[in-house]
């Protein structure tokens, strides 16, 4: 490589290094943007995961309430069925009792019984009449017992029907609450699924950005390695150039000294010839001869 080529090569290397520096700066800026965007997406992903866990916990709590209400509803339905069966049994018993009731009405029998009891209590009766009336009371009591049993069953049916009404109201309330909770559970579940889908998309985008970041980092690494090689090449060229300049300087110094020495010797020779001819010397010529004589004396 010639002396003229080296500066040109170094200039070319400087241009290449400047270009690599610009590419490296651009790559660094792009890498920082990728990192920032990736980190934001990862933060969004973490936030969505937290919201998903909260929605899942809320949904599970609602489902537990739904399960408890369904158990209550099932128990209520079982109780309602049992009450209906009891009412049915009571009605059947009333039907059987009605078959055994006398032809006279309950009102007539009760009136006759009251009249007899009043007569016994308020009238003086002989023993025969009293025994006869007491026997009539027993017969009337026996006849009225079927009506009393019917009244008892009717009262039981009324109580059961009142309880059934309460159970129906409770069942309606449970159904309304269950419907509302089931709807809320479904809505919460849909929100959770939407969060999961959004989180998956963000995670995919974040992973893609991370891969792009890794590639950008690898490209930056390659640029740095290429720059290092060019810098090393430039350093060697500069060293070679410096060595060439130093060698040239030494050659120039030697040549200059040779020329100066030859000129000095020529001037000394001319000065001595003038001195031998008896001619007057200039101050420079005199000084030159004096330095020469001094140099010979020291030798």
Image (tube, rainbow, N blue to C red):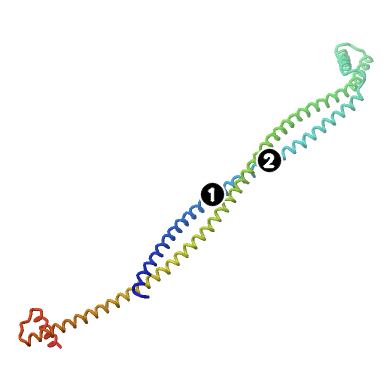
State the residue position of label 1: 44
- Name which residue lies at 19% across and 80% down: 260
- The crowd level at tag 2 (other Cα within 10 Å; few <14, some 14-19, many 20+) is many
Question: How many labels, in total?
Answer: 2
* Front-lying residue, 217 or 270: 270
**Which of the labelled discs sits on residue 185, or is there none?**
none
| Place of residue 287 in the rendered image (x, y in percent of width and height, measured from the top left) | 10, 80
| Place of residue 54 in the rendered image (x, y in percent of width and height, measured from the top left) | 59, 45
- Foreground disc of the pair 2, 1: 1
| Left or right placement of residue 228 versus residue 272 in this view | right
| Place of residue 167 in the rendered image (x, y in percent of width and height, measured from the top left) | 74, 32
State the residue position of label 2: 66
The quarter of the picture where residue 151 lies is: top right
Measure the C-alpha gap from mark 2 to mark 1.
Answer: 32 Å
- Name which residue lies at 56% across and 53% down: 205
Q: Considering the image in quadrants, where does the N terminus appear?
A: bottom left
| Pointer 2 with pointer 1, Cβ within 8 A | no
- 153 up-or-down from 216: above or below: above
* Front-lying residue, 72 or 289: 289
| Left or right placement of residue 10 versus residue 180 in this view | left
Q: Earlier in the sequence, mark 2 or mark 1?
A: 1
* Front-lying residue, 5 or 21: 5
- Name which residue lies at 81% across and 32% down: 84
| Place of residue 51 in the rendered image (x, y in percent of width and height, measured from the top left) | 57, 46
| Left or right placement of residue 200 versus residue 92 in this view | left
**At numbered mark 2, what does the secondary structure look like: helix, strand or loop?**
helix
Q: Considering the image in quadrants, where does the C terminus appear?
A: bottom left
**At numbered mark 1, what does the secondary structure look like: helix, strand or loop?**
helix
Residue furthest top in the image: 123
- 120 up-or-down from 161: above or below: above
* Front-lying residue, 230 or 159: 230
- The crowd level at tag 1 (other Cα within 10 Å; few <14, some 14-19, many 20+) is some
């Amino acid at each position: 490589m010639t002396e003229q080529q080296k500066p040109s090569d170094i200039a070319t290397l400087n241009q290449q290094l400047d270009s690599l520096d610009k590419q490296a700066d651009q790559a660094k800026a792009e890498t920082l943007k990728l990192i920032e965007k990736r980190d934001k997406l990862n933060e969004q992903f973490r936030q969505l995961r937290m919201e998903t866990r909260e929605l899942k916990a809320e949904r599970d709590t609602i489902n537990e309430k739904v399960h408890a209400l369904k158990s209550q509803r099932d128990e209520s339905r079982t109780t309602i069925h049992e009450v209906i069966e009891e009412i049915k049994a009571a009605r059947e018993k009333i039907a059987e009792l009605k078959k055994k009731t006398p032809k006279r009405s309950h009102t007539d029998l009760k009136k006759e019984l009251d009249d007899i009891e009043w007569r016994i209590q308020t009238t003086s009766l002989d023993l025969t009449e009293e025994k006869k009336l007491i026997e009539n009371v027993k017969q009337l009591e026996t006849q009225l017992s079927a009506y009393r049993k019917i009244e008892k069953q009717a009262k039981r049916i009324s109580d059961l029907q009142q309880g059934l009404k309460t159970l129906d109201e409770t069942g309606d309330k449970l159904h309304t609450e269950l419907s509302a909770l089931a709807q809320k559970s479904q809505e919460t579940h849909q929100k959770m699924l939407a969060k999961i889908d959004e989180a998956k998309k963000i995670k995919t985008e974040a992973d893609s950005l991370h891969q792009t970041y890794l590639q950008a980092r690898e490209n930056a690494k390659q640029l740095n390695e290429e720059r290092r090689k060019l810098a090393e090449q430039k350093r060697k060229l500069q060293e070679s150039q410096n060595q060439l300049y130093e060698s040239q300087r030494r050659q120039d110094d030697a040549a200059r000294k040779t020329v100066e020495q030859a000129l000095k010797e020529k001037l000394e020779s001319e000065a001595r010839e003038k001195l031998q001819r008896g001619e007057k010397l200039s101050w420079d010529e005199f000084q030159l001869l004096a330095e020469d004589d001094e140099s010979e004396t020291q030798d």
